[in-house]
Amino acid sequence: MKHISFFIFFLCLFLVLPVQGQKERKYVFKDSLDHKLDFSDFLLNPKGFIPFAQPVTEPALGNIGIMGGPVFIHPNKHPVKEYTPPNITTILGGYSANKSWAVGVYHLGYNTKHKFKYSFATGYGSVNMDYYREVLNQGEKDFEFNFKSIPVDLTFMKQIGDSKLYLGVEYDYMHSEITPNFDFEHLPDFVNEKDISSTLSSPGLIVEYDSRDSMFTPDKGTFFNATYHINEQWTGSDYNFQDLRIEALQFLQFTHNWVSGFRLQLEFQSDNAPFYLEPAVELRGVPKSRYQGKSTYLVETEQRYDITMRWSAVAFAGMAKAVREKENFDAARLVYNYGSGFRYLIARKFKLRVGLDFAWSNNDFGYYIVFGSSWNQRN
């Protein structure tokens, strides 16, 4: 399962397109520079795409599964002198061992002529997720819930002059029907009755700065994003809470083949949010939603060494804390991760690398196929 992405990539080596005459053919998945496997020229074709497939290795989703679909990456029609991000469209579907499934569509567009960018995402799924809580006299216990949800995300950001700064708005909507997948006489104390069937309607404000030389696998540059969301009755939400999420990435290229990445992520949330939206530690090797709190603090570094133009080795490590309500920072549990992996430059003209990571944390292990940067949660 974990090799399926690379099987698809190498399978494409056998695809050919006719040129000039019937007898003349060329491989469109080879780079003209070094004649290695590369999707750049295929993506530059109006109908070109990367067939993306990735195993689902998330412990909270049953440890194994598969997700994938076509990823269309097209150059911007109005490039500027600096790096110009491409437009991305993808249709994805997935299924995991614990009978979770989901389908969705995502589009990210850049209009450099009028200096704005936008995105749209929606889907539907039936997802079985584990959530972890400390239970008196039982220690840590997991509770599995089934979520049938329809999420929608809309963003619009305007560039400020010729700078790398963007200001914008975002709107998130999600209706969820939740069913506990365990025997109970009373709902656990961290679950409210209205969580079982609820609607979130959340407008937000965004401040973003992006000077990276690639939106996929940067060698240098800075990325900063601060997003503030509000849920209130007047927004159409069943909840009343606010959320502030801050993320900063810094990439430094010390030599032509050594890139250092640094990540800082903070999130703060007021009371009365549903349990499944509480801030959680997001590190490779850590099950999603295992460590939740009213605030999270995270730092991580990733070092990439390019052995050749195509192949790279990576090593990473991080630590984080999720601070619960009425708990001070020092008392919160320290969560850590570390691991290594490799990358292959699959589309040189887009600076897009793919690869495989192996990660360990306090009590868990995970492996991940990486498309671009492992830190590309929202961008």
Image: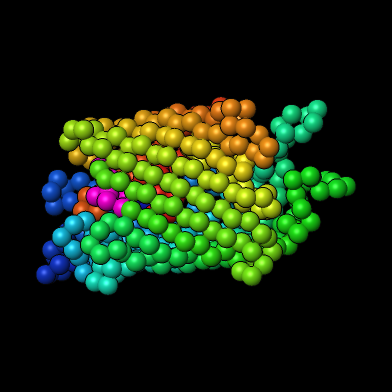
Q: Quadrant of the C terminus?
A: bottom left
Dominant secondary-structure state across the stretch colored magenta:
loop
Which residue is found at the position 66% from the left and 34% from the top? 327
Whether the magenta-drawn stretch holds residue 213 is answered as yes
Which residue is found at the position 79% from the left and 45% from the top? 188
Query: Would residue 259 appear left or right of 338 to someone viewing this image?
Result: left
Q: Position of residue 318 (x, y in %)?
A: 45, 31
All told, the count of numbered labels is 0
Part of the protein shown in magenta: 210-219
Whether the magenta-drawn stretch holds residue 328 is answered as no
Question: Which of these two is toward me, 18 or 1?
Answer: 1
Query: Would residue 18 appear left or right of 14 to someone viewing this image?
Result: left
Query: Would residue 307 appear left or right of 242 to someone viewing this image?
Result: left
Considering only vertical position in the picture, is 177 above or below 327?
A: below
Which residue is found at the position 48% from the left and 37% from the top? 298
From where the camera sits, is residue 231 visible?
yes
Question: Which of these two is toward me, 71 or 2?
Answer: 71
Determine the residue located farthest toward the bottom in the rendered image: 114
Question: Which of these two is toward me, 47 or 258?
Answer: 258
From where the camera sits, is residue 42 visible?
no
Which residue is found at the position 39% from the left and 44% from the top? 248
Query: Would residue 295 appear left or right of 118 to someone viewing this image?
Result: right
Q: Position of residue 238 (x, y in %)?
A: 69, 64
Question: Which of these two is toward me, 193 or 94?
Answer: 193
Considering only vertical position in the picture, is 181 above or below 368?
A: below
Q: Position of residue 314 (x, y in %)?
A: 33, 33
